[in-house]
Image (spheres, rainbow, N blue to C red):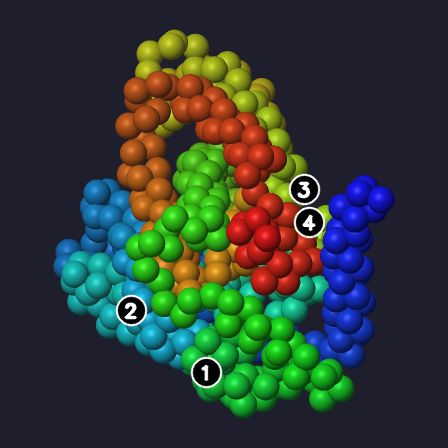
């Protein structure tokens, strides 16, 4: 009898969960996704713009270092800053985005970030000296930081759980598409006209977002129920009983405070997702993705790809293809499985990279990769070029499948509404700060522990991210945002 009494509440809870799930499935079966996809397209024009910003420096820097005008010609050091100053602007943009997304909402924040994109590229188009180039890069970096925070939030708060993984992964897909677009356009246009083309996506985003709704969750957090129902009706179609979803979100909003205070940092529903989000951003950058991309051109040259421009397009195309694959399978395979597969793949590929550098550099003299290419015997390098190209291709495939898109998706899913702006801002700030550190210190690191040692270090960090994923990262596939937040709270 006592056993029956103890188990009865569990059975009741299971029955309630089953009923809720049936009700949820019934609702989602009536949903039409056409306008949701339309709103997603308008929003991901921001990450497309962001991709053009990242890809712009690759074709532009060689031209600017050879240009005859001394006011515009960049030295090696100036070219390095032209490429990396974007990360400083993006880090500041992450902080700014965390503030404005809570003040003016997700939609207006997206429209706002189009302005520094447009003004930044305009500064580059009209540049008469170095400072106009730098200002343009900082402004476009600032806009990229805001975009990388706001767009994942906008999409996750609009989407329902059946498609949130797929359309959330479109953020990273559009970033790598923008990078490839900049590389391809750079094959045919000079640096000024490339900036003109790069300013088109943010202009279109500014126009298209005028016709898209604010997210229902933000509207309900502001007490605007009627507008939230209208937004849901727009996003879910005329057949879905949107009052049911609105009531569910409203109930979740009532159960949490509307403002964040220092005492909330003791709440596991806040500090646990914050720890997971920040560590995922650290591990994403310390996979060594920037190192691989930075030296991709050298590796392709060793494999007899004489046109470095075409080589960079091949690398970008590989990223696009496998990021699209990740987007397609995200809601089927799950976030956690893809992260683990991605981490294992990168761990193996970078270990092989280390072996490649160890074999090609005969003298263990802490030489840089550049000196390794210059000083090492040519025959072993030529014979082993396939090893470098193969491991690089494997690494890019692994990164694109998991650790490229997934940290941004999970960041947009795990925070409670009141902490979403601050939590996402800290994640974006961490990501871009780590990107800047890796970019500026990578050469010094190779001088200190050799090229082989550096890539073995990255391989070890990839092994750590697999362990971190297995132990700390929750599976969010098929769960509502409210269910994910309840997981962290332990309720």
Local packing at callout 3 (Cα closer than 10 Å; few below 14, some 14-19, many 20+) is some
**Which element carries disc 3, helix, strand or loop?**
helix
Q: Nearer the viewer, mark 2 or mark 3?
A: 3
In the image, residue 219 sits, relative to residue 25, either above or below, namely below
Question: For mark 4, does the 10 Å Cα neighbourhood hold few (<14), some (14 to 19), or many (20 or more) residues?
Answer: some
| Residue 73 image offset from top left, x and y in percent | 20, 54
Circle 4 is placed at which residue position? 334
Q: Residue 434 sits in which quadrant?
A: top left
Residue labelled with disc 3: 337
Residue at x 39%, y 63% (from the top left corner): 421
Upstream in sequence: badge 2 or badge 3: 2
Q: What element carries label 1?
A: loop
**Residue 42 appears in the rendering:** no
Dot 4: element? loop
Q: Find the distance from the CA under tag 3 to the CA under tag 1.
A: 38 Å
Q: Name the residue nearer the viewer: 323 or 227.
A: 227
Q: Of discs 4 and 1, which sits in the foreground?
A: 1
* Tags 2 and 1 touching, CB below 8 Å: no
- In the rendered image, is residue 229 in sight? yes
Residue 223's tag is: 1
Q: Is residue 191 left or right of residue 33?
A: left
Q: Distance between the residues labelled 2 and 4?
A: 38 Å
Mark 2 falls on what kind of element?
A: helix
Upstream in sequence: badge 2 or badge 1: 2
* Circles 4, 1 touching at the beta carbon (< 8 Å): no
């Amino acid at each position: 009898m006592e056993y029956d009494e103890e188990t009865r509440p569990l059975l009741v809870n299971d029955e309630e969960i089953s009923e809720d799930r049936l009700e949820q499935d019934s609702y989602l079966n009536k949903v039409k996704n056409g306008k949701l996809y339309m709103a997603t397209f308008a929003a991901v024009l921001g990450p497309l713009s962001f991709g053009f910003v990242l890809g712009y420096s690759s074709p532009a820097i060689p031209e600017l270092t050879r240009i005859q005008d001394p006011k515009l010609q960049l030295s090696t050091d100036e070219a390095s800053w032209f490429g990396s100053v974007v990360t400083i602007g993006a880090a500041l943009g992450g902080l700014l985005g965390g503030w404005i997304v809570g003040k003016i909402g997700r939609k207006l924040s997206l429209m706002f970030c189009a302005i520094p994109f447009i003004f930044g590229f305009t500064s580059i188009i009209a540049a008469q000296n170095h400072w106009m180039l730098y200002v343009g890069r900082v402004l476009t970096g600032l806009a990229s930081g805001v975009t990388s925070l706001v767009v994942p939030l906008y999409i996750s708060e609009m989407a329902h759980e059946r498609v949130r993984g797929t359309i959330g992964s479109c953020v990273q897909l559009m970033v790598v598409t923008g990078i490839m677009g900049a590389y391809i356009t750079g094959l045919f246009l000079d640096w000024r006209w490339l900036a003109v083309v790069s300013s088109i996506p943010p202009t279109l985003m500014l126009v298209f977002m005028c016709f898209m709704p604010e997210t229902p969750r933000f509207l309900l957090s502001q007490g605007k129920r009627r507008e939230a129902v209208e937004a849901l009706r727009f996003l879910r179609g005329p057949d879905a009983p949107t009052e049911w979803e609105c009531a569910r979100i409203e109930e979740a909003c009532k159960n949490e405070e509307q403002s964040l205070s220092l005492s909330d940092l003791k709440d596991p529903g806040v500090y646990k997702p914050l720890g997971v989000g920040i560590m995922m951003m650290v591990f994403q950058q310390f996979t060594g993705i920037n190192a691989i991309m930075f030296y991709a051109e050298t590796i392709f040259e060793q494999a007899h790809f004489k046109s470095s421009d075409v080589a960079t397009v091949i690398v970008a195309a590989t990223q696009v293809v496998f990021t699209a694959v990740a987007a397609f399978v995200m809601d089927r395979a799950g976030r956690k499985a893809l992260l683990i597969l991605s981490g294992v793949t990168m761990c193996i590929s970078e270990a092989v990279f280390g072996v490649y550098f160890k074999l090609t550099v005969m003298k263990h003299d802490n030489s840089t990769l550049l000196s390794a290419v210059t000083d090492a015997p040519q025959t072993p390098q030529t014979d082993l070029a396939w090893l470098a190209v193969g491991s690089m291709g494997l690494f890019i495939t692994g990164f694109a499948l998991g650790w490229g898109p997934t940290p941004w998706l999970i960041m947009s899913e795990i925070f409670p509404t009141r902490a979403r702006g601050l939590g996402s801002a800290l994640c974006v700030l961490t990501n871009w700060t780590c990107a800047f550190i890796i970019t500026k210190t990578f050469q010094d690191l190779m001088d200190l522990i050799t090229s082989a040692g550096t890539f073995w270090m990255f391989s070890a960090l990839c092994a750590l991210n697999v362990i971190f994923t297995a132990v700390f990262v929750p599976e969010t596939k098929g769960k509502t945002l409210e269910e994910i937040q309840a997981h962290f709270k332990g309720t």
